[in-house]
Structure formats: C-alpha cells, structure tokens
Amino acid sequence: MAVIRTEGLTKHYGRSPALEDLDLEVAQGEVFGYLGPNGSGKTTTIRLLLGLIRPTAGRAQVLGGDAQRDVVAIHRRLAYVPGDTALWPQLTGAETLHLLGAVHGSVDANYRAALVERFELDPSKRVRAYSKGNRQKLALIAALMTRAEVLVLDEPTAGLDPLMEQQFRACVREAQDRGQTVFLSSHVLAEVEALCGRVAILRAGRLVEVGSLDHMRLRAALAVEASFDGPLPDLAGVPGVTAVERAGQTVRCQVTGSIGPLLGRLAEAGATRVVSREPSLEELFLTHYGSGPHAAAPPAGDGR
Amino acid sequence: MSRTAAGVTARLAWRRTWRGAAAVGLSIVLVTVTAVLGYEAAYPDPADRVTLARSIGSNPGLSALFGEPRDLETMAGFTEWRVVLILAVVGAVWALLATTRVLRGEEDEGRTELLLAGPMTRTTAARATLGGLGGTVLLLLAITLVGLVAGSGRDLGAGPAALLALTVVGMPVVMVGVGALASQVADTRRRATGLGAAVLGVAYLVRVLADSSADLRWLRWATPLGWIELAHPLTEPDPVPVVLLYVLGGVLALVALALVGVRDTGAGLRSARGATRQRVRGLTSPVGLAARLAAGSAWAWAIGLLLAGGLIGLVARTAAEALAQSAGQDMLGGLGIEDSGTRAYVGIFYLFITIALALAAAGQVAATREEEATGRVDALLVRPVTRGRWLAGRVVVAVGLLALGAGAAVLGTWAAGRAAGLGVGAADLGTAGVNTLPAALFVLGAGTALHGVLPRLAVPLTYALVTASFLLEVVGASVGLPTWLLNLSVLHHVAPAPAVDPDWLAGAVLVLLGLGLAVVGAVALRARDLVSA
Ligand SMILES: Nc1ncnc2c1ncn2[C@@H]1O[C@H](COP(=O)(O)OP(=O)(O)OP(=O)(O)O)[C@@H](O)[C@H]1O
Ligand SMILES: [Mg+2]
C-alpha cells in the first residue's frame, strides 16, 4: 500500500512554478530519498504533504487520507523535521519536548529520555541558548520520540556533527526495522546512499528520475578509458558513446546502454589497456542536477 | 550612491520605513489642517469661542489629557491645545515601532548576521541603520514642514506653522533614540518595543501629573512630552524645549551606538538566563502554549493599567471639584456627558483605558502573526492540531489578557479612589471596566480577520485601525467632522461610563462583529498558504 501518493501535484507562486505535475508513490516501510538542487521544489512538496500550503492543482494523499483535509488524522501518525527549525526561544528544551509530545498524543517518556541521552542534548537550556545543531537535535528528538508511522524529514541533519549524523542514521535504520516509512530530503549524498532504497530526483520543479539506487547505477553512463600504441580510433558514431576526450595515447569516453559496440571498436583499433568504472553516486546525481555531466563545474570566465 | 555594505544597510533601513513616515507625516498635516479649518467652521462667533475657552480652560480633566490650554478663544490657541500633544504621541509610537523593527527585528530574523559577515562591524551596521532611519525622519520632517506651512501657513503664520512641525516631529526623534537604546537593552524586538512603550507611557503619566496641579508644573521639564507643551509653537513660541527634544534624541542614539559593541548579536544586555527552572504545568496544548507566551505581556499590561487606573482614582476628585465650578459644560456635552461630578472625569479617562486595551488587542494580533511569520506555528500544525484550533487558542488567551487589563484598571481606580475619597462605587467602576472591552474585542476580531485575509499587512492595518479611531474620536468631535465619518471610529461607539450609562446595545454589536470577523479570519486562514515573514 502506498503511504504517500501524489497525483499531478502542482504548486505555483504567482506565475513561477515551484512544483509541476508531480506523480509519486512511496510504499510502506520504504526509506525514500528526495533529491534535487536548491530551489528545485523539495520543501514545497513536503509542505504540500503536510497541508501547510495549498496545491495549485493535483492532490496528495498520506496514509490514505487527503493531505489538506484530513490533517488531524494524518498528523497523529506522522512526524516531521524541518531543516531550519523555528521553536519558541523562551521555552527550555525539556518544556518544548513536553509540549510537543503532549500535543502529538502519547509519548513514551523512557524512549524520549533515551533519545535525549543518545543525541547528547542538555534539555535544561532555553531554546534561545541552543546552537543551531542543538536546536536541530531537539527537533529530531521531538519527531523520533513519537514513533510515528511516517517520518517526513527535510534536510534533518543540517548542522549536525559527524557523530550525531551517525546517531541519526542508526535511528533511521531502527525506524525502518520497526516498519516506519521515511521520506528523506537531503543534500548529503552519503547519507542518502547509506539509508535510501529508492530515490527521486527533482529539477526545477519536475521529477526527472525515480527508482532504486542500484537500478539507476545500472542505467547510468559507464566511464571508459582506453590506451593505444598506435593511432587513436575515431569513436564518434559508435552507439551509446558520449563525451569523448583524447589525451596523448589515451581516449576517455562515457557509454550508456550496451558496451558491446564500443569494445568491438576498441579491440579493432588495437587497444593495449581498457579501464572502466561505475560512476560515483556524486557523478550520478550531478548528471541529473545540472544540464550535463560537467554542469557542476563553474562556468569559465566567471571572475568573481 | 555608495555601494558599500554600510550604504546597502542604510538604504535597507530607509526602504523599510519611509512609507510609514510618509503616512504619519500626511496624517499630521491632515489632522492639523482639519482642526484649523474646523475651528473656524464650528465656532464662527467670538462669543462662542469665549464660552468654549471658559469651559475647557477650567477643566482639569481635559487639560490632563491634552495639556494645559491657553488662548483658547483664538484659532492658534485652540489648534495648539487640540493637536500638538496627540500628534506628537502618534508620531512617537510610529518612531518606536519603526526603530525597533529595523534595529532589532532584522537581527531577530538573523538577517543582520548575513550583513555582519561582510566587511562591517556591528557598530558600523547600527550606525548605518540609524543613518537610514535618520533619512526617514528627515522625510517626516519635510512632509510636515511643507504640509503645515502650505496648508495652514495662511491661517497660523508661516513661522509658527514651521515651529509646530518641528515640535511635533521632535517627539518621534526622541523615540528613535529611545527605540535604539531599548533595542540594545532588550533581547527581542517585542521586548524592546514594550520597553520603549513603557518609557513613553511613563513620560505621558509624568506630564499628566505635571498638568494636574499648579504645584507640579515644574515636572514638565522632566518629560519630553512636557517640553512639547512648553514649546507653545503657536501661542508663545519658545525654541529651547524644541532644541532639547532633538538633542535628547541624538544623545540617546549615541548611547545606543556605544552599547552596540558591548552586547552580543542576537542577545540583549539584559540577556536571557541560561539554565532555568522547568515549568511544564499547563504546557500540554496549543492554548496552554498561547497562555504561556502571552504571560509576559499580560503582566506588563495589567501592571501598567493598574497604575493608570490608580492615577485616575487619585486625581479624579480634585479635578471634579474644579470641574463643578467651571462655567460651561459644552465640552462634556459634546461627549454626551451630562454629569459634572467625579464620574464625568473618570468617564473621560476610561476612554483612554479603552484605547490602551485596543492597542493591547492589536499587540496580540501582532504576536499571533509573528508565530506564523517565524514558522514557529509549523511545529504545532504538523502535529494533530488544526489551524482553527490554534487560532481559537490564541484568541481566547488574548480575550483573557484584555479582561485582565480591564480588571486591573478598575482595581487600581477603586483602591486609589478609596484612599482619595473618589465616591464612585465599586459596581459603577466595574461597569465602566466592562464597558472598555467591546472596542478592544472588536479590534481583536478585525485584526484576526486581517490576519486571515492579508497576513503580511495585518499588523500595520490593525494598528492603523486603532490610530485612526483615536484620531477621529479625539480630534474629530470638536472640529465638527460629519457623523458618518465619526461613526467609522470604533471608539465613537463607546459611551464614557461611568459618566453616562454604557451603551450595551452598541457594545453587544461591537462584540458580535468582532466575533464574526474572527470567524472570517479563521476561515480565511484555513483556506490559504502559511506565509513567512
Ligand atoms: N513562499 C514562496 N513564495 C514564492 N516562491 C517560493 C516560496 N516558497 C518557495 N518558492 C520558490 O519555489 C521554488 C522551490 O522552492 P523549495 O523551497 O521547494 O526548494 P528546495 O528544493 O527545498 O530547495 P533547497 O534545497 O534550497 O531547500 C524555489 O524557486 C523558490 O524560490
Ligand atoms: Mg528545502
């Protein structure tokens, strides 16, 4: 059963589209990665799922209810962590946890205490006195302590130190073991790689890719480097080959789909050495983030 | 134009404040010109003017409100008495809000830190912001000067009209200094504003005391609002107090700048304590949270209104005795007051309690909007809480705060009145207290509707509603504005109890309208996006 389902979900601010015609399904028990460059519409999607903003068109369902109408029923079973948490500066950490727990419903006090311990938070301080990372920890504890069926996380580890990042990952894994569903938007690719089964990639408000990481790797371009003693072969026109570069006695290129035709060509030209490697996760994403495999490099001549 | 960081900062401050300054400047011009023209229209006959002058001149209640009158049988004297102090106070409120907004609001939202990361120290940034604000004040002065000289220069004389402008704008200048200082001392914008408002309130009360008895006249020199009075721009011009206003504003701003380097960004000198007592009782629901968040303001308003009510109780009888000997009752008649005793005096003063409560209501609307603008409300709304329930909790707490304030004022008057032999019964005072609430509740409802429909404009519009009502009621009645215009003022529908019986029907209508508007606000809030600052 789909825990999160959107159909043609669209949000425009004035005339500028923040999210365009999003169709997405997240199944129960999944840890689903939600990626995309800055301003691509991730937070917009999440705020739509939470009923904080109204869609221009389309609809979103969470746990079988309408994200706009069934707010109370859905939110009883959901917890959310924003990337930049705004909490009441005059309350202490403990008071905040008490309030948010009571508002949510029942909270297991022992589990809450365990989380506070785990994230090494001093709950006696006022929120105003917390550092950014500590505020983020407070928001994480407030969400995790509910053991909600669905965790919606928008850059939840922004500002956490590496040790806390590890704790966070452990918590997400435990959540998954308990059968909780996690919707995770993040810019930390290592985090996504470690946690997520499936990911969706958004660009300029549109879904450009969705699938399992393994599957995406398989479909992604392979980087191939071949060395020659004699003259270099002309690889233009070989099916699936792009981004050909020549340097001395070696040729580099990328190939998608079947590698057969390329290997044939290289063998024919008397290649002395052929090396190929899978793209890193980073390369994989950068392909989708920018307009091409090298789009992430700063444009030449930008003198600032 | 400078492209430096300081230049950008200064222009930012200017951009965020100049519209307000223009609006205040135009209001000053409009009110004064209307008062001048209205006087001629309403009292064309010299005999009328003399009667008016006698009745007002011997009424300590009115002089406590508007300052000591002089030369009331002349247009200059009447205009000066009627507009100078009130307009100075209106300008002062604007200046305080604008100053804490650019000096402290920006910082609370973390925007200042971005600027400070640039090649600029905090002192430079604060100096630049104050510079931009200085430009805004100059705009206010220019509009007021040009407007008054052009609009009333013929009737009042160009020189006096210009000094009138300088006098009225002097108070905003002082409040820019007060606001700048408060922004350094307090740890959030709202507290800075509260602190500045308290200073203004004390300044006003000291002036009331100074005007209440001949023995206390010297106290005028102790408050900038006293200097405003001492300037007498239209009847007996004295530039010294006016100069003092500008000097005081400048000195306060300099002290504030010196303090900038001393405190931490995002904190105040009187900074929040670190580890503290945990108080979780009641903190289990949105309404419990609303009560906790409003507790500070509730105490501040309650104490302030208790003191104000006490002051009324103390001076009312003396004032009433003088009032009983006064020749005419025209002024009171204008307010619908037949009674000439202590009750009349208390009735007039309770109109000001009503205004204070209306301002408190606007403050609660602002606090509710702030919860949304900062995104703190998200923490509730992503949990099983509907927007309607959240808003209802805020409104209920605000109503409680207003009731507490009214109760405190009544308590103050009653207790002080017992000591001073006021002679107005507790039941009558209680009734007068209840009578102060409908207008404030209407403002709360209207502000809630505005919050639902126009979130980004709701706060300024709600304060504008109170200010416009105040100006219409206080200035409008005596200059003969048309009834339909006066009826637009919320305060016009509040009878000055205990001088007369409360108009319960009008009160009920105000309360019901407020309730209806609050429902409109809730429905509109449900249907829209949450909107950040
Ligand atoms: N309240 C708003 N008014 C106008 N435009 C908005 C508003 N909120 C978001 N946008 C626009 O919508 C687009 C998507 O924004 P969104 O916050 O969803 O991006 P994001 O993917 O979360 O980015 P980031 O990785 O930086 O968090 C952006 O172009 C943004 O400028
Ligand atoms: Mg985002």
Image (cartoon, coloured by chain):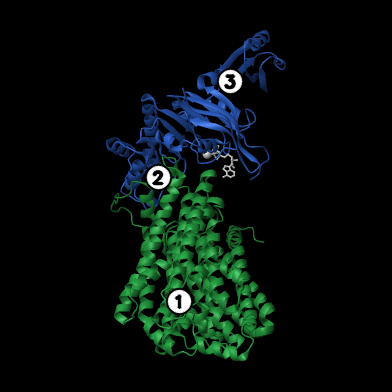
> Tag 2, which secondary structure?
helix
Q: What separation in Å lies between label 2 and label 1 (alpha carbons)?
A: 50 Å
Task: Tell me the amino acid under the disc marked 2.
Answer: Arg
Residue A202 percent across, percent down from the top left: 57, 31
> Looking at the colours in the rendered structure, which chain would you say is drawn in blue?
A
Mark 1 vs mark 3, foreground winner is 1
Give coordinates of residue A180: x percent, y percent: 40, 27
Give the numbered dot on residue B348.
Answer: 1
The kind of residue tagged 3 is Ala
The quadrant holding residue A230 is: top right
Category of crowding for the residue at label 3, using alpha-carbon neighbours closer than 10 angstroms: few (below 14), some (14–19), many (at least 20): some
> What is the drawing colour of chain B?
green
Chain holding disc 1: B
- Residue on which the image places disc 3: A220
Chain bearing tag 2 is A
Q: Secondary structure at mark 1?
A: helix
